[in-house]
Amino acid sequence: MFVLTGTASVFRPRALRTVAAERGRSLPGVPGDVYDTIALTEGNELTLALKSLGGLMISPPDCTVVTEVMPTWRALWIQRLRWQRGALENLGAYGIRPQTFRYWAQQLGIGYGVIALSCYLLLIAVMLASLDHWVWFPFWVGIGLVFAVERVVTVWRGGPAARLLGASLFPELFFAMFLNAVYVKGILDISFGRTGRWELETTGPSAQEPELAGRGA
C-alpha cells in the first residue's frame, strides 16, 4: 500500500502500540500518541511511521473502493491543498530515509509535471501568437493518442460514457492544471511559513468535512 486511507484501515494493536512508544524517538510526534496531531494528513503520516518501523500494509486484491467527490471547486481546493501540503510536511518531518525515497520521488515527479505542463501550454500559446495557421506535429499527436488509449482502457469497466470521457483527455488535462495550482500553493504556503489548518465547507444545513485519505498519484 502506498498510503493508508483513514476511513478504511484495520490495525494490529501491536503496531499502534509500537508507534506510540517510538514517538519522540525514531518517529516525529509526542511520546505515547498513536497519531501525530500536528499532521494535516494523519493517514499519510501514520503510513510513514509504520513503514519506518518495518511494518507492512496490504490491501486485498479484490477490494474495490468507492468515495464521494467534493461537491464544489472550493471544497475540492481545500481537500487537495490539505492533502498536498500535509504530504510535503510529513516528508519534511521524516527527512530522507529508505522508507521515504518513493514518496520524495513522487513529489519531485509532481513538481516536474507542474513545470512540464506549464511549459507545454506556454509553448502552444507562443506558437498560436507567432503563426497564422495551426501546425500538427506527428510526434505529439502520437503521444496524445497513446494517452487517450491508456485512459480508455483504464475506465473501460465504467461503460461507454466513461470511455468517451477518458478519450477526450481535456477534462483530465483541466483537472491536472487544477492540481498543479494546488501543488504550487502548498509549496508557497510552506515557504512563507503560513499556518496550515483544517477547514470546513458548508454544502447544506450542516458542514461537510473533506474526506480523509492520502493522495496516491
Image: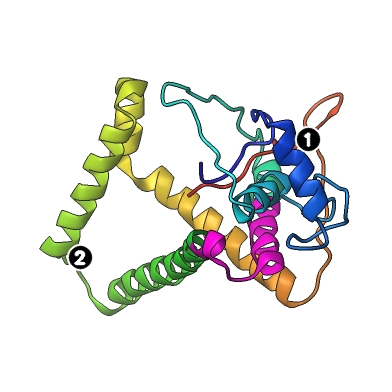
Residue plotted at (57% across, 44% down): 3
Residue plotted at (61% across, 59% down): 182
The answer to whether 215 appears left or right of 156 in the picture is right
| Magenta stretch: helix, strand or loop mostly | helix
Mark toward the start of the polypeptide (1 vs 2): 2
Magenta span contains residue 206: no
Residue 2 to residue 6: above or below: below
Q: Residues within 10 Å of mark 2 (few under 14, many from 20)?
A: few
Residue labelled with disc 1: 209
Residue 36 visible here:
no
Tag 2, which secondary structure?
A: loop
Rendering coords of residue 52 (x, y %):
62, 56
Q: Which mark is residue 63?
A: none
The answer to whether 186 appears left or right of 151 in the picture is right
Residue plotted at (77% across, 61% down): 28
Per the model, the C-alpha gap separating discs 1 and 2 is 46 Å
Q: Amino acid at mark 1?
A: Glu
Q: Amino acid at mark 2?
A: Trp
| Residue at the farthest bottom position | 130
Q: Nearer the viewer, residue 150 or 23?
A: 23
Range drawn in magenta: 81-101
Rendering coords of residue 88 (x, y %):
64, 63
**Colouring:** rainbow
Residue plotted at (68% across, 69% down): 92
The answer to whether 110 appears left or right of 40 in the picture is left
Q: Which mark is residue 134?
A: 2
The answer to whether 199 appears left or right of 213 in the picture is right
- Of the two numbered discs 1 and 2 in the rendering, the one whose residue sits closer to the viewer: 1
Residue 92 to residue 59: above or below: below
Quarter of the view holding residue 24: bottom right
